[in-house]
Image (spheres, grey):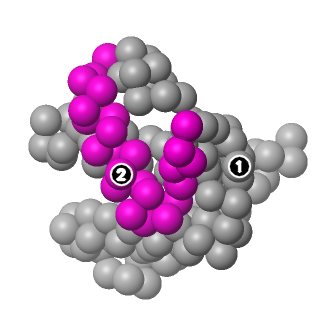
Amino acid sequence: MTDTFHSSTPIYSQLAERINKQILRGELKPGDKLPSVREMGIQVNVNPNTVQRTYRELEGMMIVESRRGQGTFVTENQSILNDMRERLKREEISQFVVSMHDMGYADEEIEAGLQKFLANRKGDDDE
């Protein structure tokens, strides 16, 4: 994990997003144990209180669960993980579409451009 954070968003929120993306990519699997608060703080070079807040945030979203005396674990509830995956997809698409609209593109142009991009990318993957 890189320890570069943007000043425009709280660090705990950025760290939560990093963990969510690790789960989406399969780097963290359901039931996996997260590093301790202290270990994570050292890994990402942030105060352990920030890591604690991150874990509380993720626990509130039911993405992780704390087990007294054992640590913090990725939920094994696939429904919650699927919901997280869909939420993150919608957020990314929304940001992309808003950005494209800001540049003056119409929905039809965005859709056509995306289809062309994906078709070209699929062709690149076949080689």
Which residue, as the protein is rendered here, is positioned at the far front? Answer: 69
Residue 50 magenta: yes
Left or right: 81, with 125 as reference point: left
- Tag 1 secondary structure: loop
Residue 104 magenta: no
Is residue 68 in view?
yes
Quadrant of the rendered structure where residue 108 is? bottom left
The residue range painted magenta reads 44-69
Q: Which residue is mark 1?
A: 31
Please tell me how crowded label 1 is: few (under 14), some (14-19), or many (20+) other residues with Cα within 10 Å. Answer: some
Front residue of 97/3: it is 3
Please name the residue shown 13% across and 35% down the image.
Answer: 7
Please name the residue shown 44% across and 42% down the image.
Answer: 18
Please name the residue shown 70% across and 69% down the image.
Answer: 78
Q: Which residue is mark 2?
A: 56
Q: Say above or below: 79 vs 16.
A: below
Is residue 113 in view?
no
